[in-house]
Image (cartoon, rainbow, N blue to C red):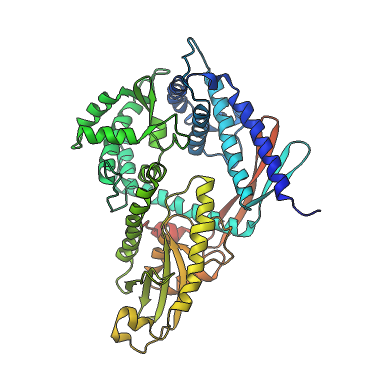
Amino acid sequence: MGKYNKRKVSQEIYEIRKKIEEEFYSHEFFSMNSEQAAELILKKLGTIHRIITGHEHIFKRQLNLDFPLFDMASFLQESLNEIFKGLILTYEKKERISNYKITVEEILDLMSIGYKISIFRTYEYFHSKDVVKVTINKKNRMDFNYVNDEVVKYNITYDVLFRDLEVYGNQKEIVKRNLNNIFDVLDFSHKQMFQINVDIDFGDFTLKDYIEFTTILNKIIIRGTYQFFIVANEYGFEKHKLSEWVKKIRKETYLSSKKIEKIITFLTFDFTDSHSDISLSYFVSVDGELMVLNTLFMMQRLDTNIIRLLNIKNKSKFDSEQKKLEEHQVCQIINNLDSRYLIERGKKAIPGVDLLVYSPFHNELHIIELKFKLPIDSAQEIIKLDQQNLKKALIQNKKAKFHIDENSVLSEYFGENFFNKKPNRIQYFTLTNYSIGIGTSTELPSSILLIDHYLRLMNTSIGNALVNDALSRNDKGMPRKFTKRFSKIALYDYQFIIPMHGAEFKNIREFIDEYHCY
């Protein structure tokens, strides 16, 4: 086998994607007036989601989506995102097409293709960043494989476990609170999203204002969604003029009409902006009215979406407010660690020393680099986390060893009572809040842990020993049996194969039953 020619393969992938997109955007749907097209698809979708709920297996089989990588929430978000990208690309002031009709089957087919294009584009980007290699055969089949497959399988399954545990923790809390009413459950789930105890400034409003706004909007949408009767093309969305939206929300909140209007404007999709993202912008302008698709709104991470939107709309403002989020992360660790540990903040001038955690009983010290990251969705954000944030963190861990005097570090940070006392062991590592990355910049075992995992380990009677064990092992002290399946995805005349890692964790029952998300 000859040397891998990345440049040639990249060009082939690019040409294939352009052909696929050209065929996708040639559909008559994209020749419509953009607002008319948006209204049409949002109206249909409200009913579609209600119909396919509970019949997902039939729906997947009919649309050729029956592959391991499929996820219903991702399908709705990513397919709509691709369709709305198409509406932006083809946007111009066009006349409305009278009597235009599109069937539910045609819309679902468009969404299916859009979803597959989204997956293909993700792995094309992964290829450009050396995350995967691709084999293309003469029968238009592309096989994607991870370059660093061993690290990827450990990292992905570790992240997925802790995200599942967060969901599990919320479900346990719902049972504990005896929430049987669907309205109470959805209201509780909404409140659980907002665990950030800092008030981010968005310019015309704050995070506190936004939480209040979405609390009321959530109630309006819940009331509209859980109706006993449904009418085709009239169900699953809310549509009002801006003044009516303001009046509707103002009736149930202390927020001023001006502030409500500012928040709605901030959250409105802009057909003229190529950076607009329908999964972040809940309102869509249609002939002077604003539509909200109930299903899309209710499946969003409302807490992080607004901060991601700030990053798109006002990067400099986002960078300044990001510091508040980092401070929240530090406070989260300090407030949730057991009182038997001594904790001090690091000195800003020293890389890799954000936090020091000392166990007097074991005479062991943790020197920690912290990396706060908003929940990541796009391929670009995944690579940025991997190849910038976490790569930098690991470098800073190494730098910290050269700046720390192990003979005097305890007295320097924890006082003269520790003069001439040297720790038995010092661990240099990174804690992060959301993901340890997919492993393009790390080797096994990696010196990165999730904050939730760290707190869970440290608050046991043998916390230090468990953390030491986790940092020294590929599986981070959580043995698992791996599975690897392949998603065969047909897209027009092409087929691409994507590997997918899963795992069955061993001896995990006790960990799950005692788990708390901090």
241 lies above or below 443: above
Q: Is residue 413 above or below residue 276?
A: below
From the top left corner, tell me how far across and down residue 103 is, in percent. Answer: 53, 17
Residue 342: % across, % down: 32, 75
Query: As rendered, which of 419 and 235 lies closer to the eye?
Result: 419
Percent across and percent down for residue 228 are 35, 23
Q: Position of residue 412 (x, y in %)?
A: 34, 81
| Residue at image location 57% in from the left, 54% down from the top | 503
Q: Is residue 165 left or right of residue 498?
A: left
Residue that extends furthest to the bottom in the rendered view of this protein: 420
Which quadrant is the C terminus positioned in? bottom left
Would residue 507 be visible to someone looking at this image? no
Q: Quadrant of residue 61?
A: top right
Q: Residue furthest right?
A: 1
Relative side of 250 to 161, left or right: left
Count of numbered labels shown in the rendering:
0
Above or below residue 349? Residue 312 is above
In the rendered image, the vertical position of residue 144 relative to residue 224, given as above or below: below
Q: Quadrant of residue 358?
A: bottom left
Q: Nearer the viewer, residue 304 or 5?
A: 5
| Residue 248 in view | yes
Residue furthest top as drawn: 99
